[in-house]
């Protein structure tokens, strides 16, 4: 989120040509503490989507538990 961006603690999941990733990695490490090469073009986006889905599942579970507790 915004706090992580301000603190420089973002995670970048990057797909593309490995040689180009290596050239850009130094710049990305200025903005994030985790820079992960995921493979060919599109794999970074796929990893991000999977991560977001996992976070959403956790939030849904938390919301359901709160709802159950309130009832």
Image (cartoon, rainbow, N blue to C red):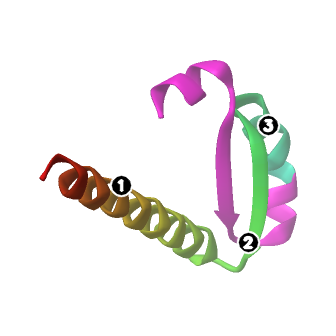
Q: Which residue is mark 3?
A: 29
Q: How crowded is the residue under tag 1: few (<14 C-alpha within 10 Å), some, or many (20+)?
A: few
- Closer to the chain start, of discs 2 and 3, is 3
Q: CA distance from mark 2 to mark 3?
A: 16 Å
Residue 41 location (% of width, % of height): 62, 76
Kindly identify which numbered label has been placed on residue 70.
Answer: none
Residue drawn at x 70%, y 80% as measured from the top left: 40
Residue 37 location (% of width, % of height): 78, 65
- Residue closest to the eye, 45 or 54: 54
Residue 43 location (% of width, % of height): 62, 77
Q: Identify the secondary structure beneath mark 2.
A: strand
Question: Which image quadrant for residue 15?
Answer: bottom right
- Residue closest to the eye, 16 or 70: 70
**In the image, which residues are magenta?**
1-22
Residue at the limit of the structure toward the left, as seen here: 71
Residue drawn at x 47%, y 27% as measured from the top left: 2
Residue 69 location (% of width, % of height): 24, 51
69 to the left or right of 25: left
Taking the magenta stretch, the answer to whether it contains residue 38 is: no
Does 46 appear above or below 26?
Answer: below
- Closer to the chain start, of discs 2 and 1, is 2
Q: Which residue is mark 2?
A: 38
Number of disc labels: 3
Q: CA distance from mark 2 to mark 1?
A: 30 Å
- Closer to the chain start, of discs 1 and 3, is 3
Residue drawn at x 68%, y 62% as measured from the top left: 14
Q: Nearer the viewer, mark 1 or mark 3?
A: 1
- Residue closest to the eye, 36 or 61: 61
Q: Which residue is mark 1?
A: 62
Q: CA distance from mark 1 to mark 3?
A: 32 Å
Q: Identify the secondary structure beneath mark 3.
A: helix
């Amino acid at each position: 989120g915004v706090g992580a961006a301000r603190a420089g603690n973002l995670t970048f999941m990057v797909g593309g040509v490995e040689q180009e990733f290596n050239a850009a990695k130094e710049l990305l490490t200025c903005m994030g503490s985790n820079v992960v090469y995921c493979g060919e073009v599109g794999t970074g986006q796929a990893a991000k989507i999977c991560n977001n889905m996992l976070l959403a599942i956790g939030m849904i579970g938390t919301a359901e538990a709160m709802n159950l507790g309130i009832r």
